[in-house]
Amino acid sequence: MAPVPVTSCFSDLPDPRDSNARHKLDEVLLIALCAVLCGAEDCSDMALFGRSKEPFLRRFLTLPHGIPSHDTFSRIFRHLDPGAFHDHFLTFMSRFAEQVEGVVAVDGKTLRRSYDRADAQSPLHLVNLWAADQRQVLGQRAVDEKSNEITAVPELLKLLSLSGVTVTADAMHCQRALSQQITEEGGHYALAVKDNQRVLFDDVRFMMETAGAGETHVDSGHGRVESRQATVITDIDWLQGAHQWPGLKAVGRITRRRELADKVSEDVAYYLLSDVVSPERLVEVTRQHWGIENRLHWVLDITMQEYQSRNRRGHGLENLALLRRLALNVAKLEPSKGSMKGKRKQAGWNDDYLLSLIRQFAQLR
C-alpha cells in the first residue's frame, strides 16, 4: 500500500541541515512527536520507538532511508531554530489562542538539571502561557534568567486575543506596562502584589486591614483542610490617586489557612484587579492560576520526566521542551476522559488511538 500523504505544521519549517540530509525534517519531527505521545523521554527513545513502530509509521510517512538514528534526532533538535519551531507550534494552536476564554496564567519553570557546571551554563528557564479552562499551553519562551520574564511575557501575550480574558501572574509581573497592555487589548488582570512594589504593597495592605473579614471557602481531602478567606474592595479612589495604576478597579486579599494532622500554616496574598469581581470569583481565579503547577508543571516533571532532562547542547533542551508541550496539547485535545499518563500508555499500545491523536495535529489525508 502506498504511504498516505501527510500535511503538518512542520512541512515548511526551515531545515538546519544541508541539502544532502537523508531524512525528511517533517518526518523526523512527526516521529519524535509520536514517540513523546507514547512515552519517549529522549532522542534514544525516539529512535527505538521508530524502529519498533516502523510498519505503523510507513502508513503515513515515506521514510526513504528508514528510521533516523538517535544521533539524527539529537542533531536536529540541537540545531533547529527554536523561534521558527515555536512559530509552527503557534500555527497549530492559533485557532485555540484566538478563542481562548477564562483565565490565562503566566508562570516560569526552571529545568534544574540543565545546569552545566563545567561550562558555568545556567539552567534553562522557560516562561509558559497556560489556558486554565482549556488546559492548553498557548506559548513558551526561553529566557536567560528568571528576571528576564518581565520582558518575555508582553511578547507572548501579543500572540493571543485577550478580549474578555483574565491574565493572572505572580508579583514579578505586577508591572504598569503589562497592566496597560492587557487593558488596552480588552482583557482583565489579577496580579499578585508584594514588596517588590513596596509603596504600592504597603498601601494595599493598609486598605485591606480596614476591611471586613470577607467570605470563607473551605476545602478538604487527602488528610488536610484548607480555608480561603477572600475580601474585595472597590472604593479605591485614594489608592488610585496615589498610584494611577493602569486599569485598576479593585484590590483583593486572600488569607489561606492549611491544616494538616500535625501542622497549621497561614499566608496572606494581595491582588490588583482590573475587574470588579466577587470574593468567590477571586478565590476561583487564583486557584485557576495555581493550576499551572499541578496540571502543567507536575505533568511535565512527573509524567513526562522533564525534570530529568540533561540535554545541554545547542537548542536541544528548549526544542524538546516545546515538543513535550505540543504532545501534551495534542493529548488534551483528544476528547476521551483519562489522565495524561493513561493516554500515553494507550497511544503506545493502540496504533489506532495514536493515529487519532496524530490526525488532530497532522491532518492526515
Image (cartoon, grey):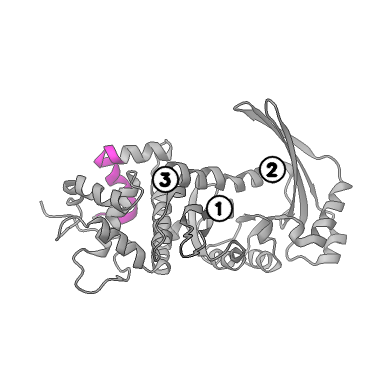
Query: In this figure, which residue is indicated by the disc labeled 1?
Result: 101
Query: In this figure, which residue is indicated by the disc labeled 2?
Result: 283
Is the residue 343 above or below the residue 330 in the image?
above
Q: CA distance from mark 1 to mark 2?
A: 18 Å
Q: Nearer the viewer, mark 1 or mark 3?
A: 3
Question: How many C-alpha atoms fall within 10 Å of the one at disc 3: few (<14), some, or many (≥20)?
Answer: many
Q: Position of residue 51 (x, y in %)?
A: 20, 48
The quadrant holding residue 317 is: bottom left
Q: Earlier in the sequence, mark 1 or mark 2?
A: 1
Q: Position of residue 235 (x, y in %)?
A: 85, 54
Is the residue 90 above or below the residue 263 in the image?
below
Q: Position of residue 79 (x, y in %)?
A: 35, 68
- Check the image and name the residue furthest to the bottom: 19
Residue 89 left/right relative to 211: left
Q: Position of residue 75 (x, y in %)?
A: 30, 64
Amino acid type, label 1: Glu
Amino acid type, label 2: Val
| Magenta stretch, overall SS | helix
The quadrant holding residue 320 is: bottom left
Query: In this figure, which residue is indicated by the disc labeled 3?
Result: 304
Is the residue 356 above or below the residue 183 in the image?
above
Q: Nearer the viewer, mark 1 or mark 2?
A: 2
Q: Earlier in the sequence, mark 2 or mark 3?
A: 2
Amino acid type, label 3: Met
Element type at mark 1: loop
Residue 239 left/right relative to 226: right
Magenta highlight on residue 353: yes
Residue 262 left/right relative to 152: right
Residues drawn in magenta: 348-364
Element type at mark 3: loop
